[in-house]
Image (cartoon, rainbow, N blue to C red):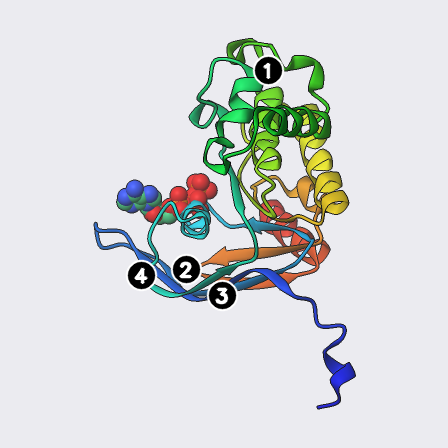
Amino acid sequence: MNPSDSVNVPTSAITVRQLCYSWPTGAQVLKSCSLAVPQGEFWMLLGTNGSGKSTLLRLLAGLLASQSGEIALQGRVGFVFQNPDHQLVMPSVGADVAFGLVEDQLSLTEVRQRVVDALSAVKLQELQRRPIYALSGGQKQRIAIAGALARQCQVLLFDEPTALLDPDSQLDLVSQVRSLVKSRGITALWVTHRLNELDYSDGAFLLSGGRVVAAGDPEPLKQRLMQQIDT
Ligand SMILES: Nc1ncnc2c1ncn2[C@@H]1O[C@H](COP(=O)(O)OP(=O)(O)OP(=O)(O)O)[C@@H](O)[C@H]1O
């Protein structure tokens, strides 16, 4: 092989090879599932209810132990849940963003700087002292993202983060995440049922029958899924 042949091959920051997963109840959710997300790209994962999208994301995040197959992630991983009330644990915005830094043994000055930077990145710096209960759903999701940015996560996993948002907040969030991914070289995998979000992605996977059955350019996949809805 000519050494220059490898120059344009993108490096994957999220790689899954032949992953299988069965719940203790016996249901096999993932059956030799494989995918790869190129470093610095924003990919989406679609599939019908119960197709295993959340299970796959939880395996990637290490929230579930894999049973067979291979998972390789480049960098620290952050997870954003569908319902931010399931992950915001501190009473105020600043305290919550700082919470994830406890294990990093940073100085107080460094922690403060990380919190300010992360809140600026999601354009919520003015809310640092706001109680969590006084945030909108969209603001809560951005605080969850700020927590991952403060931890300098290089891989972000989103499990239907817009499911509880109105259409305007939904598109604000997805476009903001795309900008963050592009400006910071982050790699993201975003689960959604909302086909209009595909316009913001670099690529998409369709999960069906426990494996990825389509992968690549989001537009053809969007057209195909829209036709299925229409028929
Ligand atoms: N804790 C659990 N114990 C047993 N089975 C589970 C558990 N969590 C999920 N499952 C099952 O695994 C399958 C895949 O669920 P999963 O939540 O991964 O699908 P999904 O594609 O994310 O669905 P949705 O789009 O509805 O969120 C389903 O049949 C579900 O009932």
- Disc 3 crowd rating (10 Å Cα; few below 14, some 14-19, many 20+) is many
Residue at disc 2, secondary structure: loop
Of the residues shown, which amino acid type is indicated by label 2? Gly
Looking at the image, is 158 positioned above or below residue 70?
A: above
The image shows residue 49 at horizontal and vertical percentages of 44, 44
Ligand 1 within 8 Å, label 1 CB: no
Residue 21: image quadrant is: bottom left
Q: Nearer the viewer, residue 184 or 46?
A: 184
Which residue is label 1 attached to? 136
Q: Which mark is residue 210?
A: 2
Please state which of the two labelled residues, at mark 2 or mark 4, is closer to the viewer.
4
> Residue at 48% of width from left, 47% of height from top?
48
Whichever of callouts 2 and 4 sits on the residue coming sooner in the sequence is 4
Ligand 1 shown in quarter:
top left
Q: Nearer the viewer, residue 83 or 112?
A: 112
> Residue at 66% of width from left, 48% of height from top?
186
Which residue is label 3 attached to? 34
Of the residues shown, which amino acid type is indicated by label 3? Ser
Please state which of the two labelled residues, at mark 2 or mark 1, is closer to the viewer.
1
Estimate the spatial distance between the alpha carbons at disc 2 and disc 1, rounded to whole Å: 35 Å
